[in-house]
Image: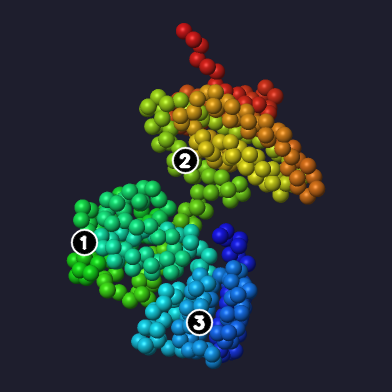
C-alpha cells in the first residue's frame, strides 16, 4: 500500500449518537483532512463495509448500538482488517476489559481530549507501517505478546531472542526506530545490549525501552544509565505500553526529520555541502591510506547565470533540479554526490577506476546536453562541465582544489566536457 493510496482513504464511524458521529466526522475533516462514512447501526456498518472495505483507513466505533451491544461491531471491523478505535463514555475496569478483549488500536473517551487522541491516531496510522520496532526477549510468550501489541498499531515488528541476536538484526536494519528489550536473557543481557547499541547509535537515532519483570530500582536505573530512553516494569497495562512506545518513536521521528532537513539541499533533494563534508573526509583518508583508486570531481552548469537572467530564477531552479536528477541517477551509486552550492556539484568516489569515472561523467554530460527543461512553455537547454582528479593530494580539500583546476580547464577549452587528470606518464 502506498502513502498516496492511504491519503484518499476514508474512516468508517459507527456510532448510535448522531451528535457524537457528527462531532467525530467534523474533527476528522477539519483537523486530519480525512473524509468519513457514518453508520448508526451494525446493519448499516455491514452494508458500508461490503461496498467500501478496500477504501477505508480505519474504523471508529461506539460499543452501544441499537441492534448490537458489545463486541459484534469490533469483531466485524477487525474481520475487515481495519485498525479499530473504540469510543467509550467512561474508562472503568469493566469497559477496559471489554475493549482489550480484542486487538483494537486503542480506546478513547467521548470528550474533547478523546477527540484530540482520535485525530492523532488517524494521523499516525498511515505512517506506522513504515516504522520498524525490534522486540528482544528470551521468552517466546513475551515476544509474541509484545509483537502482537505493536502489530495492532500497524508497526513492522522484528524479533530477537537475546542481545547478540538483536545486534545482528540491528546491523541488517539500521532504520529500526525502537528496540523494546527484556533484561534477563542468556548470552548478552539487556544492559549489555543497550551499551552495545549506544556504541553504534545515538538515542536520537534509535530509541531503547527496557522492559523487565524484575521491577527493582536497580533494573530501571541500570537501563537508564546504560543509555535506554525509558523503562517499563512487567506486568504493565496496554495503555502504559503504548504511551511509552509512542513517546520513544515520536522522539526518534522528530530527530530524524531535523537531521534530514539539515543535511539535504532543499531545492534538489541532494546531499548538501554540510552532509558531504560530514562524510567525505573520512572516506577520502581511508581510501588514500589503502591506495584505492579514487575520483574527486567538481561539476558546474555552463552559463547558468544566463538561464537566470533570461528566464528568471524559477526557471533557474527548475534547471538545477533537472541537472541534479540526471547526475544523481548516474553518480549516487558510485560515491558521495552533493550540491556544493549555486550551480556547482561535487563528488567523491572511492574504489572507482579511471575508466568507470570517465564513463559515468561522460554519460551525465551527454544526458544533460540532450535534455530539455520545459518551463512555463519555454524549452531551456544547458550543458555541464566536469573536472576529475584521480590521485589523492594531501587531504580532501587539496584534491577538490585539483578537481576545480581541471574544471577550469574544461571551461576554458570550450565547456560541455569532462576533463580528467592526465594519466601519469609510463616510465
Ligand atoms: Mg528474560
Rate crowding at label 3 as few (under 14), some (14 to 19) or many (20 or more) other CA atoms within 10 Å: many
Q: CA distance from mark 2 to mark 3?
A: 57 Å
Classify 10 Å Cα crowding around label 2: few (below 14), some (14-19), many (20 and above).
Answer: some
- Can you give x and y, in whole percent of width and height, for residue 313 in the image? 71, 47
Q: Quadrant of ligand 1?
A: bottom left
Residue 114 shows in this picture: no
Where 403 falls versus 341 (above or below)? above
Q: Does the Cβ of the disc 3 residue fall within 8 Å of ligand 1?
A: no
Residue at figure coordinates x 67%, y 22% from the top left: 413
Are the two marked residues, 3 and 1, in contact with CB atoms closer than 8 angstroms?
Answer: no
The quadrant in which the N terminus is found is bottom right
Chosen colour scheme: rainbow
Percent position of residue 84, x then y: 49, 75
The answer to whether the beta carbon of the residue marked 2 is less than 8 Å from any atom of ligand 1 is: no
**Disc marking residue 277:** 2
Which residue appears at 45% of the width and 37% of the height?
280
Gap in angstroms between the C-alphas marked 2 and 1: 42 Å
- In the rendered picture of this protein, how many numbered marks are placed on residues? 3
In the displayed structure image, the side of residue 217 where residue 133 appears, left or right: right
Q: Residues within 10 Å of mark 1 (few under 14, many from 20)?
A: many
Q: Secondary structure at mark 1?
A: loop
* Residue 84 seen in render: yes
- The residue singled out by tag 3 in the image is 73
- Image spot of residue 131 (x, y percent): 45, 60
From the viewer's perspective, is 403 left or right of 159? right
Pick the residue in front: 419 or 18.
Answer: 18
Which label is found at residue 236?
Answer: none
Nearer-N-terminus badge (2/1): 1
* Mark 1 residue's CB less than 8 Å from ligand 1: yes
Q: Which residue is identified by label 1?
A: 184
Amino acid at each position: 500500500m502506498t502513502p498516496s493510496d492511504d491519503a484518499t482513504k476514508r474512516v468508517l464511524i459507527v456510532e448510535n449518537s448522531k451528535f457524537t458521529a457528527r462531532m467525530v466526522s467534523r474533527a476528522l475533516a477539519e483537523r486530519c483532512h480525512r473524509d468519513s462514512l457514518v453508520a448508526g447501526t451494525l446493519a448499516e456498518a455491514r452494508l458500508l463495509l461490503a461496498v467500501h472495505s478496500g477504501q477505508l483507513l480505519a474504523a471508529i466505533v461506539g460499543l452501544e448500538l441499537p441492534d448490537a451491544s458489545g463486541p459484534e461491531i469490533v469483531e466485524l471491523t477487525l474481520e475487515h482488517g481495519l485498525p479499530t478505535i473504540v469510543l467509550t463514555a467512561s474508562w472503568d475496569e469493566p469497559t477496559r476489559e471489554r475493549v482489550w478483549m480484542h486487538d483494537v488500536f486503542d480506546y478513547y473517551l467521548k470528550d474533547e481530549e478523546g477527540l484530540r487522541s482520535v485525530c492523532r491516531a488517524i494521523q499516525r496510522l498511515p505512517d506506522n507501517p513504515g516504522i520498524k520496532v525490534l522486540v528482544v526477549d528470551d521468552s517466546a510468550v513475551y515476544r509474541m505478546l509484545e509483537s502482537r501489541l505493536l502489530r495492532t498499531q500497524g508497526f513492522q515488528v522484528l524479533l530477537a531472542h537475546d542481545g547478540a541476536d538483536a545486534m545482528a538484526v540491528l546491523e541488517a536494519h539500521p532504520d529500526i526506530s525502537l528496540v523494546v528489550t527484556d533484561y534477563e536473557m542468556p548470552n548478552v543481557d539487556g544492559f549489555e545490549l543497550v551499551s552495545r547499541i549506544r556504541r553504534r547509535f545515538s538515542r536520537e537515532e534509535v530509541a531503547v525501552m527496557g522492559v523487565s519483570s524484575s521491577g527493582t530500582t536497580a533494573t530501571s536505573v541500570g537501563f537508564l544509565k546504560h543509555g535506554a530512553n525509558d523503562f517499563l516494569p512487567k506486568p504493565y497495562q496496554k495503555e502504559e505500553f503504548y504511551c511509552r512506545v509512542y513517546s520513544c518513536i515520536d522522539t526518534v521521528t522528530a530527530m530524524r526529520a531535523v537531521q534530514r532537513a539539515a543535511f539535504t539541499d532543499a531545492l534538489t533533494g541532494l546531499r548538501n555541502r554540510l552532509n558531504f563534508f560530514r562524510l567525505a573526509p573520512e572516506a577520502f583518508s581511508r581510501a588514500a591510506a589503502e591506495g584505492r583508486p579514487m575520483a574527486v570531481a567538481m561539476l558546474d552548469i555552463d552559463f547558468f547565470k544566463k538561464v537566470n537572467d533570461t528566464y528568471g530564477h524559477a526557471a533557474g531552479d527548475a534547471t538545477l533540479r533537472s541537472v541534479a536528477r540526471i547526475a544523481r541517477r548516474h553518480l549516487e551509486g558510485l560515491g558521495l554526490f552533493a550540491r556544493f552550492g549555486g550551480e556547482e556539484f561535487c563528488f567523491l568516489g572511492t574504489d572507482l577506476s579511471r575508466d568507470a569515472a570517465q564513463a559515468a561523467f561522460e554519460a551525465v554530460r551527454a544526458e544533460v546536453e540532450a535534455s530539455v527543461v520545459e518551463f512555463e512553455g519555454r524549452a531551456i537547454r544547458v550543458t555541464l562541465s566536469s573536472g576529475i582528479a584521480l590521485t589523492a593530494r594531501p587531504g580532501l580539500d587539496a584534491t577538490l582544489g585539483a578537481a576545480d583546476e581541471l574544471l577550469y580547464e574544461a571551461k576554458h577549452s570550450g565547456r560541455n566536457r569532462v576533463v580528467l587528470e592526465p594519466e601519469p606518464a609510463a616510465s
